[in-house]
Image: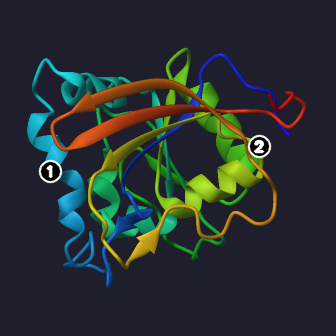
Amino acid sequence: MAAKKSNPIRLYMSMSLDGYIAGPDDRPGQELGRAGGRLFNWLDDRESDGPSGQVHREALATGAVISGRRTFELAGRWQGDHHAGVPILVLTHHVDDGDVPPGHARFVTDVDDCARQAREAAGDRPVMVHGAGAAQALLRAGQMDEMEIHLVQVLLGDGRRLFDHLGGDHIELDLVRRLDDRDVTHLRYRVRRPEEKTP
């Protein structure tokens, strides 16, 4: 497992209380699935001086993005710019010949190499992670340092879960910050390394 670096790789995801990050049938034209938009109502307060505004500004201050391939495609490849022209590293199983992603995006097929490139590109700033597939791959590889979960008080009941395919490894987390706001609780967890003792 990789040691924690000074610039954390940090997941940012909105999630329902029952663990869903999108409603059922997420696809082009219905990117968040049926009723999945409910998870993002907190973004109505992203320009505020409150906790949701703070968390949103922190996300946009990250120096690189790691995205799963599915998230990247559903987002219309962000037209090559997720925010502020930072590099977008798209973790994917394979790349078709001639498929060149737009703008600041590039495909990477190895999770450890993806994490290394993202940390280097971000400099002293955190790396933002998007997507369940990328999050699970980084967690399995020991490359995820932190997770910022925007926990929304709703039970979606069905859809795409954030932590469905982690495998059998036990992963301990430390809650390092909790910010309550209208309709959401922003929870930041540090991913504990296997060599750290469990209390």
Q: Tell me the colour scheme of the image.
A: rainbow
Residue 186, percent from left and from top: 35, 35
Which quadrant, please, contains the N terminus? top right
Which residue is identified by label 2? 142
Name which residue lies at 27% across and 30% down. Answer: 180
Q: Dividing the picture into quarters, in which one does residue 25 lie?
A: bottom left
Choose between 89 and 16: the one closer to the eye: 16
The disc labelled 2 sits on which kind of residue?
Gly
Are there few (<14), some (14-19), or many (20+) residues within 10 Å of tag 1? Answer: some
Tell me: 191 left or right of 18. Answer: right
Q: Residue furthest right?
A: 195
The answer to whether 133 appears left or right of 114 in the picture is left
Instruction: Give amino acid for label 1.
Output: Asn
User: Foreground residue, 191 or 110?
Assistant: 191
Label 2 Cα neighbours within 10 Å, binned few <14 / some 14-19 / many ≥20 = many
Q: Which residue is mark 1?
A: 41
Quadrant of the rendered structure where residue 8 is? top right
Question: First in sequence: mark 1 or mark 2?
Answer: 1
Task: Determine which of the numbered discs, if any, sits on residue 90 in the image.
Answer: none
Q: Nearer the viewer, residue 110 or 198?
A: 198
User: Residue 19: image x %, image y %?
Assistant: 45, 62
Circles 1 and 2 in contact, beta carbons < 8 Å: no
Residue drawn at x 35%, y 76% is 157
Give the vertical position of 49 relative to 166 (above or below): above
Residue in the image at 25% along x and 42% along y: 184
Q: Is residue 13 above or below residue 51?
A: below
Residue lying furthest bottom: 25
